Amino acid sequence: MYIKKCSILFCIMMLLFQSGCDIKTTKQNKELESIKEIKIGFTVYRRDDTFIAMIVSNMEEAIKEGEQQENIKITMNIMDAKGSQTVQNDHIDKLIEQGCDVLCVNLVDRTVAATVVDKAKAADIPVVFFNREPVKQDLERWHKVYYVGAKADESGKLEGQIVADVYYKNNGAMDKNGDGKLQYVVLEGEQGHQDALLRTEYAVKTITECGIQMDKLAGDTANWLRSQAETKVNQWLQIYSDTIELILCNNDDMALGAIDAYENADKVLPAIVGIDGTALAIEAMKEGKLLGTVKNDAQKQAELIFTLCYCLATKKDASSKIDFVREKYVFTEYTMITPDKIDMK
Ligand code: BGC
Ligand code: CA
C-alpha cells in the first residue's frame, strides 16, 4: 500500500516537472521566434590591415549567407580603432549603448581585455575576441567570453618547413656563400602580439631541427606593414649588402615590403617566406619572388566568428557546430602554400 502511494506521488511529481519543462521550452521557442534581428558590434584594431580586411569581408559574406539560411535580419556595425585603444574603448561603449546582441573585438592592445570584458559583463553582452589573443586570466573573467584565432607556433613551424624543403630540394644552394650556415634577417610583427615572437621562434627552431645551421644578422619589427618592412630592409641592405641569404617574415605584407626594397635597389632577391596566404603574396610566389607562405584561414575564422555570434545572440548551443578548446577557444588550422601545393594555372 505504502509503495503504491509512493509511486503515485512520484508519477505526479514527474508530471509536474515535465509540464514545467514544457512551459520553459515553449517560452524559449517563443523568445527565439520573436527574434527578428541580430545586431553584431564589431571593432577592429585597424581596418587597413590586410589580414583584418580579409576577416571583415569574409564576415560580411557569412552574414549574407546566414540571413538567407536563418531567414532573419543580421546587421554588423564595424568600428575602426585606427590603432588606438582609447578610441576602441569609446567604440565599445557606443556599441553597448546601441544595444548590440554580441560584441566582436579585435583588440588594439591585447593586454587590456579585462576592461572590455567588465564593460560587456555589466551589460550582459557576450564577447568574441579574435586574432589578437587576450591573456588567459582576462578570458576567464566571465563565462560569456570567447577567442577565435589560430595557433602561432603552428604557422612558424610550417614557415620553417617551407625553407627547409627548398633548401634540401636545391642541394643547399640557398647558402650562397657556402659557409654551411644560412645568414638570415627577421621582419617581426608588432611587439607583444602572440603571432610575432612565436612565429619567429618556431620557424628558426624548425629549420635548425631539419639540420640547417642558422646565423642571424638582424631582426626588427615592421609592425605587420609593407611600407615599414621596405624601409627596414633598405637599411639592412646598406649594412649587409648581398650577404643576406634568407628573410623570415612574420606576415605576407612584410614579405612584399622586403621584395619592394630589393626590386627598387635592383638587387637579386634572397629566399623570402611569409605567412597569411594573401592574394598578392600568392601572386608574388607564382612570379618566383617568394618561396611560399602559410595560409592563415580568414574565411574559416570569419565563419566561426559568425556562427558563434549567431548562437550567442539567439541563445542556441554552439557546441554542436563548433569544436571548443577548453570551452572558450576556437582555433583554425594553418596550411602551407608553396608553388607545388597550389593550382598554378
Ligand atoms: C596576421 C597579420 C596581421 C595581424 C593583425 C596576424 O595574425 O598574420 O597579417 O597583421 O594578425 O593582428
Ligand atoms: Ca651562408
Image (cartoon, grey):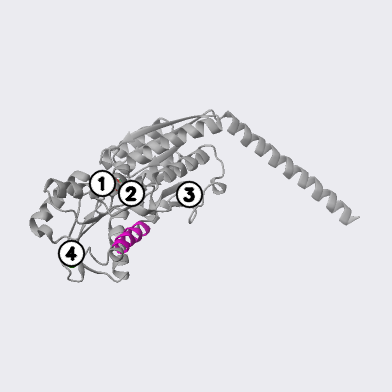
Q: Is residue 152 visible?
A: yes
The amino acid marked with disc number 4 is Lys
Q: Nearer the viewer, mark 4 or mark 2?
A: 4
Q: Position of residue 12 (x, y in %)?
A: 80, 45
Looking at marks 4 and 3 on the same chain, the residue that comes earlier in the sequence is marked by 3
Depth order, front residue of 260/324: 260
Give the Cα distance between marks 3 and 1. Answer: 36 Å
User: Dot 4: few (<14), some (14–19), or many (≥20) neighbours within 10 Å?
Assistant: some
Q: Are marks 3 and 1 in contact (CB under 8 Å)?
A: no
* Quadrant of the picture in which ligand 2 is shown: bottom left
Q: What residue do we see at 30% from left, 58% from top?
A: 199
Q: What residue do we see at 30% from left, 41% from top?
A: 50
Residue 163 is a magenta residue: yes
Q: Are marks 4 and 3 in contact (CB under 8 Å)?
A: no
Ligand 1 within 8 Å of the CB at mark 2: yes
The amino acid marked with disc number 1 is Asp
- Asked where in the image residue 79 lies, by quadrant, the reply is top left
Q: Which residue is mark 3?
A: 143
User: Could you say whether the residue bearing mark 4 is in a helix, strand or loop?
Assistant: loop
Q: Are marks 1 and 2 in contact (CB under 8 Å)?
A: yes
